[in-house]
Amino acid sequence: MSAVLLQPVPPSTRQLILNGVFAENPVFRLALSLCPAVAVTTTVLNGLILGIAVLLVQVLSSVTVALARGLIHPRVRIVVYTIIIAVWVSVMDMALSAFVPALYAQVGLYVKLIVAFAIIISRLEMFASKYPLVPSFWDGFGMGLGFLLALVVIGALRELLGNGSLAGVRLTAGKPLLFFALPAGGFFSIAFLMAFFNWVERRMARGRRKPAAGGTHA
Amino acid sequence: MRDPRSRSARPRIAPAVRRAPFARPARWLAVALLLALAPALARAAGEPPLIRSTRIEKPGRIVLVLSRPLPRTDPANFRFTEAAAPDLPIAVREVHVTPLGERVTLVVGQGLDPAGHYRLEVAEPPLRLDLKPSPWALLFTVILSSALINNFVFTRYLGLCIFFGVSRKRETALGMGATFAFVMVTTGMLSWLLFEFVLKPLQLRFLQVLVFIGVVAFLVQMLDTVLKKTQSALHEKFGIYLVLITTNCIILAVPLLNAAADSGPLESFALAMGSGAGFALALFLMSCARERVELARVPPSLQGLPIAFALAGLVALAFMGFSGLSLFR
């Protein structure tokens, strides 16, 4: 079979997960799928629930594409990927509205909009359509995990600063900085987190010239 | 001897002469129609309607302006309900009447939505009034609120990828904004039709994500093909954006929001229109600011996206000023 001969060697599982979490973190490094990263991160729990939804949709669609990649004609692949994602998003949408209705009421629109996430379709196109089931699963898992962690970090920062609490538990006694719970605060939090990631990278790679994060766009 | 003016003057007069036979009967017809309607108009003027105007005021008040006093003005004379729930009356607590009785204010126990649809029934004299904003006011409010108060970019954080991707140059930003607004209106209306007449009757609401993304992909592909064949110059300018639009959350959000709110055709159109205009405005503002930032000395870690995010944060702060804006007091 020619497919076996052309099969590229997949990277190791550990490499795949670390790649998604650090080197190609969807939010901080690739600057993809930013809308939910600002929109739902007013609290940790909101960020967590959307992160889990994205993780599951990414893993499930990666697995589906990896299994069906022999059947998909290259010319219609984008349409097929979109339909696969839309199916899993619909499933996730129904599951979340059934199991966690209170949280779903806050993030519902963004759960539906997972279907338009650039990060998911780009992983399907770049990875799952070329590699077999197991590496595709871990790649999807790593990317989803990176997204989840980013959402949780931003959510924790904004909830702590804007609300004085973490996951609903009150931590500080003083008056919180309402600014961070507002839309504008979301933009600023991401700006400074990104700048921090850039700064760390510049410190680590001093001497080596590398473009700043966010230079690549989709 | 030929007078050059006579030649040039003739065509100026000629159309007027030719048009006159068509214009005059129309005028006579209008006069005749007015005369025919005059008795009806006079009757309407002679006996003014009991209720001149109704309006809802913010903290649970309904103001009725009357042409003559009501015979009964105790709270039991009125039954006030929401149009959507006519079986659940909203209690009328107090009724204030001005000395001449031409103005009646009903105070109800709960806050009212000035843009909502309510029904007021009066027992004596038997009357039934629909209280709702006029369609034009509704259209204008929805457009205004989706463009400024709930701006997609600055308060709902949608379309950020594309927002930061194409807001570097003013010219691209304008082209993109126009393309987006157009696609949003067309996909919004098409998905509304599908949702209202196919998904709702067949109880297939859960398929909305699948159907809406199909509509967007189909429409964008169609637009791309049609533009390429008919307006190739325009296609060269906007073709690149069209491809970017296919899987974009901002386009998809319009039908999803409409479906979630069960809006009618007018509201759907207004939402699509307003959000498109709001997105174009956001892109334009941002591109202007980013062109300036190009010339500024930005710390190296903040260069590129981080400073753009901080800029968007500042504009979002400015947009918060719109949050108190309301058409209905």
Image: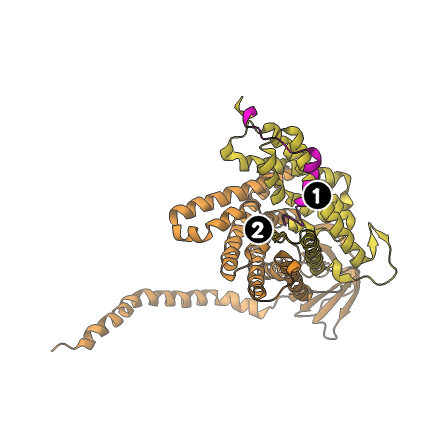
Chain colours: A yellow, B orange
Residue A138 percent coordinates (x, y): 68, 34
Q: Residues within 10 Å of mark 1 (few under 14, many from 20)?
A: many
Give the number of callouts. 2
Is residue A105 visible from the viewing direction of this image? no
Is residue A41 on the magenta stretch? no
Residue A196 percent coordinates (x, y): 71, 56
Q: Nearer the viewer, residue A154 or A127?
A: A127
Residue at 79% x, 64% y is B74
Considering only vertical position in the picture, is B154 above or below A21? below
Considering only vertical position in the picture, is B93 above or below A210? below
Q: Which residue is mark 1?
A: A21
Q: Residues within 10 Å of mark 2 (few under 14, many from 20)?
A: some
Residue at 69% x, 72% y is B102
Q: Chain of mark 2?
A: B
Q: Nearer the viewer, residue A211 or A81?
A: A211
If the image is split into quadrants, where does the N terminus of chain B sit? bottom left
Q: Which span is picked out in magenta? A: A4-32
If the image is split into quadrants, where does the C terminus of chain B sit? bottom right
Q: Which residue is mark 2?
A: B265
Question: Given the image, on which type of amino acid does mark 2 rest?
Answer: Pro
Residue lying farthest right? A173
Residue B254 percent coordinates (x, y): 60, 50
Residue B104 percent coordinates (x, y): 73, 68
Considering only vertical position in the picture, is A95 above or below B122? above
Question: Given the image, on which type of amino acid does mark 1 rest?
Answer: Val
Is residue A23 on the magenta stretch? yes
Callout 1–callout 2 Cβ contact below 8 Å? no
Classify residue A78 by image quadrant: top right
